């Protein structure tokens, strides 16, 4: 281990506890370099003198856990399950949701980055693209140890990407066992082992998680017209296995596999009709998810090369054959399987002042679905394929100034062709400060698959208090799309902490926009099925929904659908940092303003009754988010206290007034292990059993009226206790 800067290099020796003492007046700031046989070099910047612990993760051989692109400006926040923030967040997905610019949809499967459509967010596992995405049940299970949010756009993922990391083999054998129990029958456990034997590295983790809804087991009459114990229970289990093998001094082979199963009963959470929604007992879903990957990392001359191939398989079955809606049997069954094969090549090097990189990936797969209900059945199978090539280069003009250029081109059977270029500059005024700026622009010619179908009126979203109904409408191909983006990022480190401030501005023209039209306007895209409107009206007037005396106005009957002809403006700023407040207290800050609005709508959409005012913040995209966290250690009692205050502004996903959440976590050592307690939403802010009408954030519609979406309650206060034991053999 060495500590070096432009004034010299000093060898660093550590004691048995990993502590080092540097006795020199020359090295005020140095780059700590760690080299260990069979592991890749790892570095970090250290300000001297420093008493703060420094953690450096070593990667076996030349293997990487994430593809590092030579782009500037956007940064890539990382959250880990062994950090202080994990003490005040139940799952990794909860932690991701606290990153400024990240919005997690209600079901957890859709993740919006900086206000963009969740469908434009890419997903990765250990750096390998997963075109089918990663289900929320997998992300919340505990199989991933960290996640990286990368706002850098590519031709395939114009919003950026979310990269999940799994457990990696360690040099010595380590075992860990943890168990969790909390409110609403929440329980889980994890068991893991990792280590190395000669050239072989092994890591294995098994996890199980179960939780109930606050409505689970409650008896109340709903749209089924009967009293029955309601569901909402969820049970998940899964395994991760990873193997690494040192083939030669410069080559490492890695294989990994993930397998999970989630079984859940449907939950009735909406109370915006005469009776709450309901499905009767025995209605639920099962999801089986599998992922496997094989990687070869090596060094050829001055080039580092990674070859990777992988496969994902996601099968979801929804069994509602016992469902009852509007007091009528409404049996429904669906099965969907999404299967993808992915391959990638990454070549990068450091050639003098240049750092070129070539990245290429391709995928092929299919999505097959089956649906069946009373008088209706359909099946489909869509074959998909695509490829992307990224070329980038960073050139060091001087010791403190670098420039970057990059191009990205992609072609996909379900999206069409796209092209993106970017250029940026990085400037370091001093050793502790870095300022980045990057501009990118792109265009695409989509070849989207069209759909002219409408969803079953029996499953429409009815709202009696607001007198409206929503169904799923058609999906038609968009025209040419264009986008531009500018971002600036500044980082500053000092003895007691660091601060990062960034800003961005994006203009999206004709990029697919998930909006709504009155049913008459949607019918201009695709004709309505025979009797569709009357069947919807009949269901709306059922005595368990809105009643015979209530009539659904035609102007308040809408269809959700992807729309073209929309121009969006996305702008924002963010600030994250940490500072030491004495020897035992650390404060962490995260704040973001994310403006997302429609700037222009084509005349044809306006004439058909486009439901969203120009220039207004998009629903479900909070304008402001922020958090401040204090971590305080008590050495004498071996306790660590973490308190966080999180703020979420208006236009939030829940459609409630701006709110604050207070969570507290306590960690202590007991009986050779770590015992922690998490109390979330201490003051029961904005809690409740059902989504209800509160009339917040009303949206104007074509006839001069307004509609307001239901407001979803936040989770009740929870007490969660975790005990974890770890052992290590040296």
Image (cartoon, helix red, strand yellow):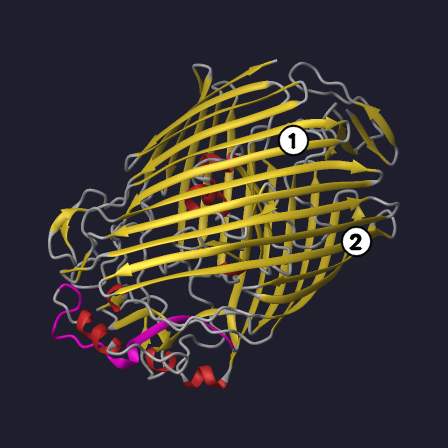
Residue occupying image coordinates x 39% and y 57%: 369
Q: Mark 2: which secondary structure? A: strand
Q: Which mark is residue 273?
A: none
- Report which residue position mark 2 lands on: 393
The C terminus lies in quadrant: top right
Q: Position of residue 250 (x, y in %)?
A: 77, 31
Is residue 44 left or right of 465 when viewed as pictured?
A: right
Q: Is residue 369 above or below residue 138?
A: below
Q: Position of residue 602 (x, y in %)?
A: 51, 82
Q: Nearer the viewer, residue 26 or 594?
A: 594
Q: Residues within 10 Å of mark 2 (few under 14, many from 20)?
A: many
Answer whether residue 560 is magenta in the image: yes
Q: Which mark is residue 57?
A: 1
Q: Mark 1: which secondary structure? A: loop
How many marks overall? 2
Q: Which range is magenta? A: 544-564
Q: Position of residue 232 (x, y in %)?
A: 27, 45
Quadrant hosting residue 106? bottom left
Answer whether residue 227 is magenta in the image: no
Q: Is residue 728 above or below residue 711?
A: above
Q: Position of residue 31 (x, y in %)?
A: 77, 34
Q: Do the residues bearing badges 2 and 1 touch, measured as CB atoms within 8 Å?
A: no
Q: Is residue 518 above or below residue 446?
A: below
């Amino acid at each position: 281990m060495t500590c070096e800067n432009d004034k010299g290099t000093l060898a660093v020796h550590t004691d048995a506890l990993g502590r080092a003492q540097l006795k020199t007046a020359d090295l005020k700031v140095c780059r700590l370099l760690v080299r260990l046989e069979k592991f890749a070099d790892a570095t970090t910047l250290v300000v001297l003198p420093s008493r703060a612990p420094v953690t450096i993760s070593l990667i076996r051989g030349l293997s990487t856990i994430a593809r590092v692109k030579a782009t500037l400006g956007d940064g890539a926040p990382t959250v880990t399950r062994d950090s202080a923030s994990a003490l005040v967040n139940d799952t990794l997905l909860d932690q991701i949701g606290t990153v400024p610019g990240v919005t997690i949809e209600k079901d957890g499967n859709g993740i919006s980055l900086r206000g963009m459509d969740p469908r434009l967010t890419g997903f990765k596992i250990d750096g390998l693209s997963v075109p089918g995405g990663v289900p929320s049940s997998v992300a919340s299970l505990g199989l991933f140890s960290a996640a990286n949010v990368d706002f850098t756009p590519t031709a395939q993922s114009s919003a950026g990407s979310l990269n999940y990391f799994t457990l990696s083999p360690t040099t010595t054998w380590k075992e860990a066992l943890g168990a969790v129990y909390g409110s609403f029958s929440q329980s889980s456990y994890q068991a893991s082992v990792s280590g190395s034997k000669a050239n072989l590295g092994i890591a294995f983790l098994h996890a199980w998680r179960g939780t109930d809804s606050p409505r689970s087991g409650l008896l109340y009459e709903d749209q089924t017209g009967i009293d029955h114990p309601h569901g909402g229970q969820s049970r998940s289990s899964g395994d991760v296995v990873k193997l690494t093998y040192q083939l030669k001094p410069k080559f490492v082979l890695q294989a990994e596999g993930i397998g999970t199963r989630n079984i859940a009963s449907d939950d009735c959470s909406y109370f915006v009709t005469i009776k709450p929604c309901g499905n009767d007992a025995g209605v639920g879903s099962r999801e089986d998810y599998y992922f496997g990957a094989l990687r070869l990392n090596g060094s050829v001359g001055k080039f580092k090369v990674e070859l990777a191939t992988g496969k994902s398989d996601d099968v979801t079955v929804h069994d509602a054959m016992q469902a009852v809606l509007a007091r009528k049997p409404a049996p429904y069954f669906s099965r969907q399987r999404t299967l993808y094969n992915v391959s990638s090549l990454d070549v990068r090097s450091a050639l003098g002042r240049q750092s070129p990189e070539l990245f290429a990936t391709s995928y092929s797969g299919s999505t097959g679905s089956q649906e069946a209900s009373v008088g209706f059945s359909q099946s489909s199978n869509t074959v998909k394929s695509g490829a992307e090539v990224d070329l980038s280069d960073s050139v060091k003009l001087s010791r403190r100034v670098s420039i970057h250029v990059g191009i990205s081109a992609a072609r996909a059977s379900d999206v069409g062709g796209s092209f993106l270029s970017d250029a940026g500059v990085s400037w370091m005024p001093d050793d502790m400060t870095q300022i980045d700026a990057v501009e990118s622009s792109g265009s695409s010619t989509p070849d989207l698959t069209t759909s002219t179908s409408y969803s079953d009126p029996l499953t429409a979203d009815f709202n009696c208090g607001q007198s409206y109904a929503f169904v799923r409408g058609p999906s038609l191909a968009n025209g040419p799309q264009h986008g531009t983006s500018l971002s600036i990022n500044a980082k500053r480190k000092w003895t007691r902490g660091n601060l990062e401030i960034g800003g961005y501005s994006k203009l999206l023209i004709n990029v697919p926009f998930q909006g709504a039209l009155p049913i008459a306007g949607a019918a201009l895209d695709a004709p309505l099925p025979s009797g569709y409107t009357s069947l919807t009206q009949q269901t709306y007037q059922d005595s368990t929904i809105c009643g015979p005396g209530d009539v659904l106005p035609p102007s308040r009957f809408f269809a959700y659908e992807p729309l073209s002809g929309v121009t969006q403006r996305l702008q924002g700023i963010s600030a994250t940092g940490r500072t030491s407040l004495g020897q035992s207290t650390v404060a962490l800050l995260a704040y973001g303003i994310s403006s997302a609005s429609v700037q222009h709508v084509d005349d044809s959409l306006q004439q058909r009754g486009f439901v969203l005012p120009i220039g207004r913040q998009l629903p479900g995209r909070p304008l402001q988010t922020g958090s401040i966290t204090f971590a305080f250690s008590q050495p004498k009692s071996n306790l660590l206290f973490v308190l966080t205050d999180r703020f979420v502004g208006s236009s939030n996903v829940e459609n409630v007034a701006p709110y604050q959440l207070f969570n507290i976590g306590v960690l202590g050592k007991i009986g050779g292990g770590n015992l922690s307690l998490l109390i979330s939403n201490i003051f029961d802010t904005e809690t409740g059993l059902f989504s209800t009408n509160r009339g917040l954030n009303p949206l104007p519609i074509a006839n001069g009226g307004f509609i307001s979406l239901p407001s979803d309650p936040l989770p009740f206060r929870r007490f969660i206790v975790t005990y974890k034991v770890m052992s290590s053999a040296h």
